Image (tube, rainbow, N blue to C red):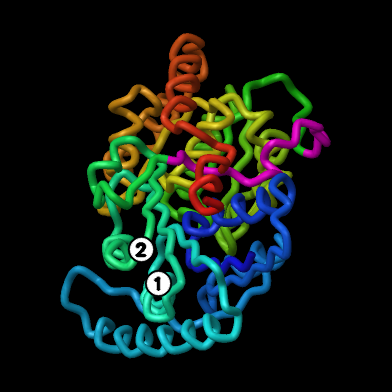
């Protein structure tokens, strides 16, 4: 069986597909399984994809904006180039199926696959359907969705609820104690998403002197967004503040297990992982994006605390963290409700669809 994966630019369109690849290799042991990934030229996905054992090839891609912008003109040409590049790889690789979880790089691949007559499976994670998946829906043979509420957003003959798969490495329970602290204070995990969130980072750094009075912090800042770039004297906080630009899946699994609560953007791939670990989470979505709908959905289901970035101050931020840390009932409720948002984390429902 040959599978062509398409996605990139952010971790959101990458994580679930890597999880599916891992399941095909480790559990289902599909005969003669071969894989190829078409992704972005400068995206962060290449290293993760190749580490998972998938051959990676970059193609041109463009972002179609919902408003007038000169960049749209240039990006249309990039999409056309991407279409022919994808068609080349389809002819050369001869996949049995094409899998995508959104992203603009997947759009020319989906249309090339339709032209080539290869079935396309598009996976919808977010509460609000993104433009990429809207564009791919007409040419997709099947649309899998992570959330039950998303079933109504697509053609009923195509759509199926499968949950959201997580990567195998996240299930590791043998902790290496690489992130232990010397005290017994609760641990707060800060996640800015795959590419980091400068606004959240700055909020943390402004609040550090107060936060370390009652908690330890593990902070994943994103590439080139470390505390050293903001001029703070890290030696003043190093006993209770540990920052990393990036952690691999095994490392992130350990900090998920160690932490008492999390603070995160509202990318669905990250929220899925936090939900799997039943981690009570303060959600700060990227303003004016689809993430706000994700945060609202979790908050409405008492599965997360939704805070708007534009309304936050260092003082109110510290108080929100303090309030959640001391409220054991609230933490348990949030964790349990978050875990129940998704019907499946294993990827087996998804695999049943593609293998059938």
Position of residue 121 measured from the top left corner of the image (x, y, whole percent): 43, 59
Q: Which residue is mark 1?
A: 110
Quarter of image, res 78: bottom left
Position of residue 196 measured from the top left corner of the image (x, y, whole percent): 51, 55
- Which residue is drawn at the image coordinates 25% and 71% (left, top)? 65
Residue 6 visible somewhere in the drawing: yes
The magenta stretch spans residue 174: yes
How packed is label 2: few (under 14 Cα within 10 Å), some, or many (20 or more)?
Answer: many
Q: On screen, 66 above or below 198?
A: below
Residue range in magenta is: 162-178
The outermost residue toward the top is 329
Task: Name the foreground residue: 11 vs 50.
Answer: 50
Task: Name the foreground residue: 269 vs 145.
Answer: 145
- Which residue is drawn at the image coordinates 27% and 61% (left, top)? 134
Mark linked to residue 332: none
Horizontal relation, residue 97 to residue 247: left or right: left
Task: Name the foreground residue: 135 vs 267.
Answer: 135
The outermost residue toward the left is 68
Quarter of image, res 338: top left
The magenta stretch spans residue 213: no
Query: What count of labels does the image hold?
Result: 2
Q: On screen, 71 above or below 265?
A: below
Q: Which residue is mark 2?
A: 140
- SS at badge 1: helix
Horizontal relation, residue 256 to residue 333: left or right: right
């Amino acid at each position: 069986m040959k599978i062509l994966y398409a996605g990139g630019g952010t971790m959101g369109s990458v994580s679930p597909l890597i999880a599916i690849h891992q399941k095909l290799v480790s559990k289902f042991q599909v005969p003669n399984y071969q894989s190829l990934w078409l992704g972005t030229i400068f995206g962060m996905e290449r290293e993760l994809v190749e580490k998972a054992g998938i051959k990676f090839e970059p193609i041109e891609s463009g972002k179609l904006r919902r408003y007038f912008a000169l960049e749209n003109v240039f990006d249309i040409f990039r999409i056309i180039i991407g279409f022919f590049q994808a068609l080349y790889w389809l002819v050369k690789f001869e996949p049995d199926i094409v899998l995508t979880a959104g992203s603009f790089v997947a759009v020319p691949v989906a249309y090339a696959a339709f032209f080539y007559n290869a079935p396309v499976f598009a996976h919808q994670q977010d509460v609000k359907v993104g433009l990429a998946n809207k564009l791919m829906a007409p040419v997709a043979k099947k649309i899998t969705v992570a959330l039950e509420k998303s079933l109504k957003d697509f053609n009923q003959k195509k759509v199926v609820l499968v949950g959201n798969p997580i990567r195998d490495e996240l299930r590791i329970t043998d902790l290496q104690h690489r992130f232990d602290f010397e005290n017994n204070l609760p641990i707060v995990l800060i996640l800015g998403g795959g590419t980091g969130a400068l606004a959240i980072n700055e909020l943390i750094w402004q609040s550090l002197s107060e936060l370390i009075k009652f908690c330890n912090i593990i902070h994943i800042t994103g590439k080139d967004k470390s505390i050293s770039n903001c001029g703070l004297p890290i030696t003043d906080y190093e006993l209770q503040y540990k920052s990393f630009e990036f952690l691999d899946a095994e490392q992130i699994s350990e900090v998920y297990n160690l932490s008492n609560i999390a603070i995160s953007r509202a990318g669905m791939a990250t929220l899925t992982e936090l939900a799997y670990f039943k981690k009570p989470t303060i959600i700060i979505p990227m303003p004016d994006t689809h993430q706000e709908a994700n945060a609202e959905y979790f908050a409405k289901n008492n599965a997360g605390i939704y805070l708007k970035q534009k309304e936050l101050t260092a003082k109110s931020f510290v108080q929100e963290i303090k309030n959640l840390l001391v409220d054991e009932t609230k933490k348990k409720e949030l964790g349990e409700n978050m875990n129940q948002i998704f019907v499946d984390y294993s990827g087996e429902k998804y695999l049943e669809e593609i293998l059938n």
